[in-house]
Amino acid sequence: MVTGLLFLGACIGVIVVVFWMVANDKLRPDEPTRGLLAMREPKTDAAPDPGPQPGRERSERSPR
Amino acid sequence: MRSFVLILTIGCLLPSCLFYPQVGMLVWGWLTLMSPHQEVYGLAQALQFNLVVAVVTLLAWLVSAEPKVPPGSAVLSAFILFVLLMGVSQLTAALPDYSFTFFDRFIREMVFIFLCLAMLNSKARIHAMLWIYAISIGYFAVKGGAFTLVSGGGYHVVGPPNSMIGDNNHIGLAVVMALPVMNYLRLQTANRPLRTGIVLAMVLSFICVLGTQSRGAFIGLAAMGLVLIWRSRHRTLSLVVIAAMAIPMVMFMPETWVERMETIGSATDDNSFNARVQAWWIAVYIALGDPLTGVGFRAGYIQSVADMFTGGGYVARAHHSIYFEILAAMGFLGLAVYLLIMFLTWRNAARVRRLARDRRGLEWAHDLASMAQATLAGYIVAGASMSVEFWAGYWLFVPILLHLRRLVEAEVVVGADAPSTALRRGPATAALEPRR
């Protein structure tokens, strides 16, 4: 019973993913995705920061 | 009933595969990762869904406007070289008919990965493929985790029969690798109930790994967990969350499980481990005898082949290691290219992390690259004691990270003049968030 329900859920999930992908495939990179599986929008502070600092790309770590 | 559901699902998706080869790519991925036809009885078990979907998808891809050639890169060159070496290894195999059974299976996976290298080229496609990944492995993880809980830790979790993850060790590794994917989806999904469902699936997945009773998967879980914490923005919080989940679960497991895991520390006294070491030595002798081509796929399992290279005295069996399997099958050259692909894939993830850090609109890429590294860490460590060298769940990360890097590089070049904006995350989502 549990396995059957999970299997049904997996099949429905795959169908949902496929149709979500078709609906969002042609979006521009900066456009937000839509639908059940929509991805989170970036949260931003009011004040912009100056962006990545020179030299930071060289390091994997960032200061705490 | 399940048979009917599967036929209905494939029947519903197959027409879309004809018009959208990218849909076929997802369905092929699902059939490869989950092997749903092994979970049913009756008619659907006998039908070759994978073959039908593969043929339809390839035909649709050929006549579509989709790119036919993947973007040029070092990892693509290494991948093509590796596939060529697979062909050479088969042509020069010690037992060609025997090896061909495995070559046929593995080369189909490589065709699927090549298709992904060509078509997995947008944010929606990558994200959708990761959902397919999570659903496919999550199905076994949730089921296995639930049964482990209900049986008080006595249930022995195994994967789908006649698949690459049928063994308890292999399904354990698959679930370990799926955990960071689920975490990425949790971080990036806007729908709150869906996020809650993913958290529940993650908890059950963790229990499932314990329920496999696999020492290799347990070590892989530890390695993956360490990278996950290391890549987290709030390491201490992540450590506390993981510990809060892990300690009660480990205490919940029966004494037999604890005793089995304790043998990890005394592996050299363990018969199973010693047999593996012997099988690794066979692989080394084979590679020394045939360093450029190896003896073909899985041929090292055959006693006569092992005796030919070792001179006798070793009992032939599975090499139980991604590295030694490749070494025996394809020689030192094959292993070198295999390791090169692994290194380049890891480097792609590291590059994405550097480029996407603190850039508005690229948080998803940063999260994905971080979680991909955790997944790869699990595979690299646990794979050392398992024969999953051609499992699609690992190979999928080659195209995913290649295209992720290209998308991020394109975005960074386009947005080079635009000021980025600082990111803000709430405390509720802070745990297990990738470190920026």
Image (cartoon, coloured by chain):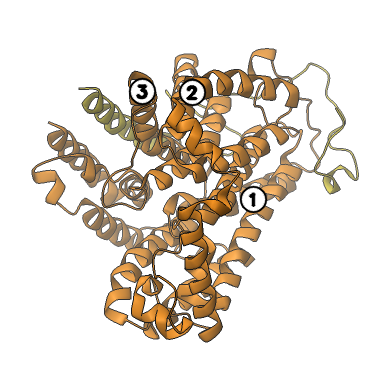
Chain colours: A yellow, B orange
Label 1 neighbour load within 10 Å: few <14, some 14-19, many 20+:
many
Residue A30 lies in quadrant: top right
Q: Which mark is residue B405?
A: 1
Name the residue nearer the viewer: B428 or B167.
Answer: B167
Q: Which label's residue is closer to the chain start, 1 or 2?
A: 2
Image quarter in which the C terminus of chain B is found:
top right
Label 3 neighbour load within 10 Å: few <14, some 14-19, many 20+:
many
* Label total for image: 3
SS at badge 1:
helix
Residue A6, percent from left and from top: 28, 27
C-alpha gap between disc 1 and disc 2: 30 Å
Q: Residue at x 70, y 19 (%)?
A: B425
Residue B427 lies in quadrant: top right
- Name the residue type under label 2: Val
Q: Which label's residue is closer to the chain start, 2 or 3?
A: 3
Q: Residue at x 53, y 71 (%)?
A: B281
Q: Which residue is mark 3?
A: B146
- Name the residue type under label 3: Ala
Residue B266, percent from left and from top: 59, 46
